[in-house]
Image: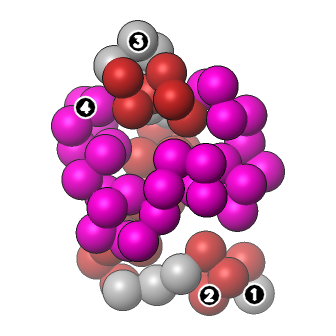
Amino acid sequence: MTAGQFNAALDKLGFTQMGFARKLELGERSVRRWAAGQWPVPVPVAMLLNLMLKTNSTVDDLKS
């Protein structure tokens, strides 16, 4: 997942970078670096975002 795809996914799901980091208990700095393309988006994070987009699910839906 590219930085552009990551940012587009967050936008489609209604997340800010900070909101996504907090909801998933991730480091805010890491999320900012993924969004800026400084670090690659980890595969599990990309998979989660793609799953949420394809199934129209929320993080809470997938936790339970």
The residue segment tinted magenta is: 1-30
CA separation, marks 1 and 3?
Answer: 32 Å
User: Quick one: label 1 or label 4, which is nearer the N terminus?
Assistant: 4
Residue type, label 2? Asp
Of discs 3 and 4, which sits in the foreground? Answer: 3
Judge the density around disc 4: few (<14), some (14-19), many (≥20) Cα neighbours within 10 Å.
some
Question: Which label belongs to residue 2?
Answer: 4
Where is residue 10 shown, x and y percent of the image? 38, 57
Residue type, label 1? Ser
User: Quick one: label 3 or label 4, which is nearer the N terminus?
Assistant: 4
Contact between marks 3 and 2 (CB within 8 A): the answer is no
Contact between marks 2 and 1 (CB within 8 A): the answer is yes
The residue depicted at 41 percent of the width and 12 percent of the height is 38
Q: Residue 29's image quarter? A: top right
Of discs 1 and 3, which sits in the foreground? Answer: 3
Judge the density around disc 1: few (<14), some (14-19), many (≥20) Cα neighbours within 10 Å.
few
43 relative to 9, above or below: above
Residue type, label 4? Thr
19 relative to 60, above or below: above
Name the residue tied to disc 3: 38
Judge the density around disc 3: few (<14), some (14-19), many (≥20) Cα neighbours within 10 Å.
few
Q: Quadrant of the N terminus?
A: top left
CA separation, marks 3 and 4?
Answer: 10 Å
Question: Which label belongs to residue 15?
Answer: none
Question: Which label belongs to residue 61?
Answer: 2
